[in-house]
Amino acid sequence: MKQPHTHVSHAAIVKRLRRASGHLNSTIEMVVQGRECLDVAQQLQAVEKAIQQAKKALIQDHLDHCLEEMVRPVTGARRQSLDEFKEITRYL
């Protein structure tokens, strides 16, 4: 059986995803209640943002821990390339 793959940041990611779930549930309820489209759109934006932030945190965590371990030793040009790759992914 495969061991669980967890990092320190996973608790924060779960928190973000739970927040997104709460926003989504609120959005569904708003649609059921027939709330104004603008209100629903704003709530959907909050759902998207929460999920986007969770995804970004997960990807950065993976790069910081998993990828770096896989390409060891990380020295010289390899270090510079990996650091640049990590930096550019912040703009995703």
Image (spheres, rainbow, N blue to C red):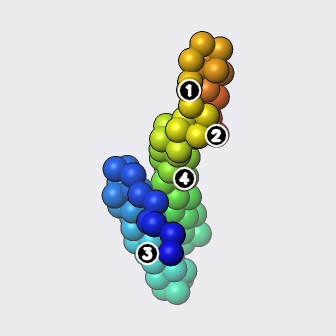
What's the amino acid at mark 4? Lys
Q: CA distance from mark 2 to mark 3?
A: 27 Å
Which quadrant: the C terminus? top right
- Return the x and y of residue 46 as percentages of the image width and height: 49, 58
Q: Which residue does the numbered mark 4 point to in the structure image?
A: 55
Position of residue 44 relative to residue 24, above or below, is above
The residue depicted at 45 percent of the width and 71 percent of the height is 21
Residues at discs 4 and 3 in contact (Cβ within 8 Å): no
Q: Nearer the viewer, mark 4 or mark 1?
A: 1
What's the amino acid at mark 2? Leu
Q: Earlier in the sequence, mark 4 or mark 3?
A: 3
Towards the viewer: 9 or 37: 9
Q: Earlier in the sequence, mark 4 or mark 2?
A: 4
Q: Nearer the viewer, mark 2 or mark 3?
A: 2
Position of residue 22 relative to residue 68, above or below, is below
The residue depicted at 45 percent of the width and 77 percent of the height is 25
- Return the x and y of residue 18 as percentages of the image width and height: 39, 67
Tell me if mark 2 has few (under 14), some (14-19) or many (20+) residues whose alpha carbon lies within 10 angstroms of its own: few
What's the amino acid at mark 3? Ser
- Return the x and y of residue 42 as percentages of the image width and height: 52, 60
Q: Which residue does the numbered mark 3 point to in the structure image?
A: 26
Q: Which residue does the numbered mark 2 point to in the structure image?
A: 92
Q: CA distance from mark 4 to mark 2?
A: 10 Å
Looking at the image, how many numbered discs can be counted on the residues?
4
